[in-house]
Amino acid sequence: MTTFQELPIGKYFKIPGMNARYVYRKASSSHCSLGVALQPIRHGTEVIPLTSTEVADYFADKFTVKLDFLKSLQQ
């Protein structure tokens, strides 16, 4: 684990104790993004940095769910 302040801008992370489906991205030294919404965050907040594989898996799952939904609308 690391703090939000130590995390490089642009990196994806999770917050311990939050729902596992919430993946955040460090947008600036004081804000993170969840989807398109910016949210303030404290510098000392502990975060769990995600590896590139975890980020790829997250987006693959997210888009698979959306694609399945769109396909269900065609039926």
Image (cartoon, grey):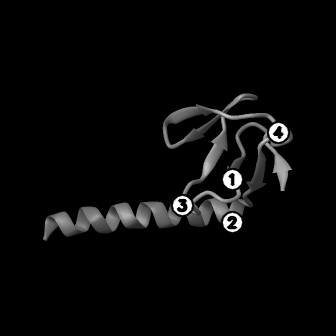
Residue under the image location 43 percent in, 61 percent down? 63
Which is closer to the viewer, label 2 or label 3?
3
Residue highlighted by disc 3: 21
Residue picked out by circle 1:
15
Say which amino acid is labelled 3: Arg
Quarter of the image that includes the C terminus: bottom left
Residue type indicated by callout 4: Gly
Considering only order in the chain, which callout, 1 or 2, is on the residue closer to the N terminus?
1
Which residue matches tag 2?
53
Q: Is residue 2 above or below residue 74?
A: above
What residue do we see at 71% from left, 58% from top? 16
Q: Earlier in the sequence, mark 1 or mark 3?
A: 1
Q: Between residues 4 and 50, which one lies in front from this camera angle?
A: 4
Q: Which numbered mark, 2 or 1, is in the foreground of this view?
A: 1
Label 3 sits on a secondary structure element that is loop
Q: Quadrant of the N terminus?
A: bottom right
Residue 4, given in percent of the width and then of the height, sits at 78, 41
Quarter of image, res 43: top right
Q: Residue at x 66, y 59 (%)?
A: 17
- Give me the C-alpha separation between circle 2 and circle 1: 18 Å
Residue found 56% across the figure and 32% down from its top: 38
Alpha carbon separation for disc pair 1 and 3: 11 Å
Name which of mark 2 and mark 4 comes first in the sequence.
4
**Residue type indicated by callout 1:** Ile
Mark 4 lies on residue: 44
Q: As displayed, is residue 15 above or below residue 70? A: above
- Quadrant for residue 52, please give it: bottom right
